[in-house]
Amino acid sequence: MSETRAEPLEIRNLLTAAAPLLGLVLVIALFALDADVRPYFFTWRNFILIFSQTAVIAVGALGMTMIIVSGGIDLSVGSAVALSSVVCATVLLSGAPELAAVSLAVVTGAALGFANGAAIGYLRMVPFIVTLGMMGIARGCAKWLAGNQTVNPPDNDVVALMSTLQGGAAGELVIPVGVWLVLLLAASVGLVMTKSVFGRHVYAIGSNEDAARLCGVRVPLVKVWIYALAGTLFGFAGVLQFARLTQGDPTVAIGLELDVIAAVVLGGASLSGGTGSVPGAMIGALIMAVLRNGSNQMGWPNYVQEIIIGLVIILAIGLDRLRQRREG
């Protein structure tokens, strides 16, 4: 009888793990139905465009996965990306080496994340409120640093991270270096979340924070590390954003936090914490990119895209709640 009960549980877990991939296939099939869109949608050029558009959301989703699995939330992602991109552009404009610009941009994101983690972990403040405040602070700092305008540095090698022509012959399109770096980061974060003590602590805090504390987990310190590491990833996302735009724009990435959170939730993570995976988040990021890409090719205006994204978020959260009730 126990075997009979175990089989449906295994099947349910398998379906839960495969749900993000099935969702991606469904979204692709949806746009494939349109005969006018199909010839352009299924081209190598368009796939490279989708991969490039996914990069920033995917890196943000890596950091957000750690945060959401731990039972937290971060609404300052878009502002952190904007500030980091402006820092990168400003440092390049000053004539400093590219490595210094990238490093300072990443450190900026890490500093924002550390501040969030310290307030949430040690001051026991609500993540929603802390990161909402940081959203305004980071955005304001970005506008102040940029003088309320775009920062346009001279030619530099950082933009090569998102160049689709790098390494190819004239007119040949290749997957940008930045996309390969995202895959490398995804593999690294995935190993940390599944194979390290830190990863187990992240899941333990999200599942039951009080129980984790009683088991000896240093919850405040782990939370600081979670938000600091996530902020580091957000800083790198800012570098990729700069590489895509070739300029630092303090008004960029407004609403990016919604796309990032949606990607993580679509990937199977629960906003209640304790559940989520890096592969699922990456597939969720692809779903978001495919939705936007397909919507643009269909000629749908931005407000229609925003409505669709909003509906997708509500649907994903609704399915998560339904799954929790069944498991309960």
Image (spheres, rainbow, N blue to C red):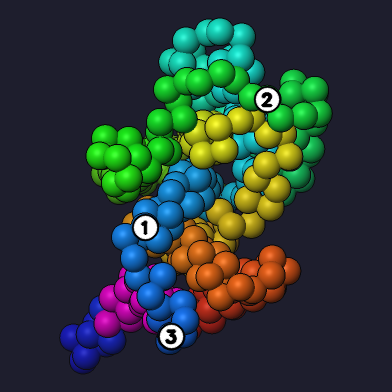
Q: Which residues are magenta?
A: 11-31
Residue 20 among those drawn in magenta = yes
Q: Which mark is residue 45?
A: 1
Q: Which quadrant would residue 261 be assigned to in this image?
A: bottom right
Determine the residue positioned at 45% across, 25% down: 158
Determine the residue positioned at 51% across, 64% down: 293
Residue type indicated by callout 2: Val
Relative depth, front residue between 4 and 310: 310
Q: In the rendered view of the protein, which quadrant contains the N terminus?
A: bottom left
Residue at which label 3 appears: 35
Q: Position of residue 200 (x, y in %)?
A: 36, 46
Residue type indicated by callout 1: Arg
Q: Earlier in the sequence, mark 1 or mark 2?
A: 1
Q: Is residue 122 found left or right of 269 in the rendered image?
A: right
Q: Disc 1 versus disc 2: distance between alpha carbons?
A: 29 Å
Q: Earlier in the sequence, mark 2 or mark 3?
A: 3
The mark tally for this picture is 3
Determine the residue positioned at 43% across, 57% down: 50
Q: Position of residue 87 (x, y in %)?
A: 62, 22
